[in-house]
Image: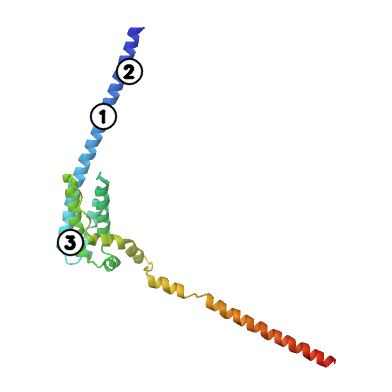
């Protein structure tokens, strides 16, 4: 029995070892494939953002050429999903989304920026983020102009699609339109006056009846 047990034990160890080696090799292959895909996406995104930046520099207005580079931005949006680092991926998504919405006059008015200047700034920031990610360094902070755009982005889209701007003046006017307490007080005083007059008429009628009876 002992030789048979040794054979079974040796077979089990060999099976577990083989499965572990296969799993480790597959994991390493997947990590290598993901890393290669991320590097390829990084290089391609760098090329696209350089092309977008050059287009912004070559035109005075960002609206006209912005429509011509929508294909570049759509491709950049797809490639961003291949970036494995979450912070880098989210930062690039912000840049691509703002580039697609930068032609909206509401966004430019609320942020106090011009499309041509901000397009170049967005592309430059994206290139800085991609370079830091490629070198394994810490990604740079967002410029104040981009932070301002992100803060007013939702409001600009809401106004662009027919919504009304949110402001303290609008809220104050709406509240002041329907004062309830003053009107309730006038109504109560009028009701009391009417009741008092009705009582006086009733008393006068009673006196007249008594006089005619006597």
Residue placed under numbered mark 1 in the picture: 24
- Location of residue 121 in the rendering, given as x and y in whole percent from the top left corner: 19, 60
- Location of residue 74 in the rendering, given as x and y in whole percent from the top left corner: 26, 53
Residue placed under numbered mark 3 in the picture: 56
> CA separation, marks 3 and 1?
47 Å
Q: In the rendered view of the protein, which quadrant contains the N terminus?
A: top left
Labels 3, 1: front one: 1
- Where on the picture, by quarter, is residue 193? bottom right
Which of the marked residues, 1 or 2, is nearer the chain's N terminus? 2
Figure check: 152 above or below 44: below
SS for dot 3:
helix
Residue placed under numbered mark 2 in the picture: 12
SS for dot 2:
helix
Figure check: 83 above or below 197: above
SS for dot 1:
helix
Residue at image coords 67%, 84%? 196
Residue at image coords 27%, 51%? 90
Q: In the rendered view of the protein, which quadrant contains the C terminus?
A: bottom right
Which of the marked residues, 2 or 3, is nearer the chain's N terminus? 2
- Where on the picture, by quarter, is residue 26? top left
- Where on the picture, by quarter, is residue 169? bottom left
Which of the marked residues, 3 or 1, is nearer the chain's N terminus? 1
Instruction: Mark 1: give few (<14), some (14-19) or many (20+) Cα within 10 Å.
Output: few
Q: Which mark is residue 134?
A: none
Residue 132 in view (yes/no): yes
Instruction: Mark 2: give few (<14), some (14-19) or many (20+) Cα within 10 Å.
Output: few
């Amino acid at each position: 029995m002992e030789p048979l047990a040794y054979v079974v034990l040796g077979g089990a160890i060999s099976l577990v070892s083989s499965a572990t080696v296969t799993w480790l090799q597959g994991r390493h292959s997947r990590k290598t494939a993901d890393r290669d895909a991320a590097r390829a996406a990084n290089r391609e995104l760098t090329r696209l953002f350089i092309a977008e930046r050059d287009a912004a520099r070559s035109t005075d207005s960002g609206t006209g050429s912005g429509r011509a580079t929508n294909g570049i931005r759509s491709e950049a949006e797809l490639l961003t999903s291949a970036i494995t680092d979450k912070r880098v991926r989210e930062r690039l998504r912000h840049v691509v989304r703002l580039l697609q919405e930068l032609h909206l006059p509401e966004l430019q008015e609320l942020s106090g920026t011009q499309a041509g200047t901000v397009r170049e700034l967005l592309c430059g920031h994206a290139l800085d983020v991609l370079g830091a990610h490629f070198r394994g360094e810490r990604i740079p902070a967002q410029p104040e102009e981009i932070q301002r755009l992100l803060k007013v982005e939702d409001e600009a889209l809401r106004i662009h699609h027919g919504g009304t701007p949110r402001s303290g003046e609008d809220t104050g006017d709406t509240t002041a339109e329907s004062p309830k307490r003053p009107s309730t007080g006038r109504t109560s005083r009028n009701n009391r006056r009417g009741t008092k007059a009705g009582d006086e008429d009733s008393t006068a009628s009673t006196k007249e009846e008594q006089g005619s009876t006597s």
